[in-house]
Image: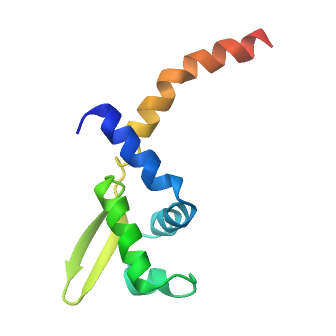
Amino acid sequence: MTEAIAVTAVMRALGDPTRRALFERVAGVEEITVADLTRGSGVTQGAISQHLKTLKQAGLVAERPEGRKVYYRVRPDGLEPLVDWMSHYGAFWRERFADL
């Protein structure tokens, strides 16, 4: 995946508020199942699964099947394309803030 495509995938995945909240919930634990993510979310299990699929395709989460359950965890390097992209513009903002 080229760098531009990776950044776009991450931004699109995290651009949806429900997916962003889901990502934060997964990031808050070591591993979690779809059933656990669905509980108390106000979103259907099918919708949670679709959101997780998008997060997985963007490289933000990984899955580990075990029997009938699938456990999800955050991929530590998943945000790297976004961090790299933002750091490229960091120098620009540091210069602007220094001028203030």
Residue 72 figure quarter: bottom left
- Residue furthest out toward the top: 99
Left or right: 36 in relation to 97: left
Quarter of the image for the N terminus: give it.
top left
Give the color scheme: rainbow, by chain, secondary structure or one colour: rainbow
Q: Position of residue 90 (x, y in %)?
A: 56, 23
Q: Position of residue 14 (x, y in %)?
A: 49, 54
- Residue 80 appears in the figure: no
Residue 3 figure quarter: top left
Q: Position of residue 33 (x, y in %)?
A: 37, 81
Quarter of the image for the C terminus: give it.
top right
Q: Residue at x 22, y 90 (%)?
A: 68
Q: Position of residue 34 (x, y in %)?
A: 38, 81
75 or 85: nearer the viewer: 85
Q: Residue at x 36, y 49 (%)?
A: 78
Relative vertical location of residue 46 with respect to residue 29 in this rendering, above or below: below
Q: Residue at x 64, y 20 (%)?
A: 93
Left or right: 42 in relation to 54: right
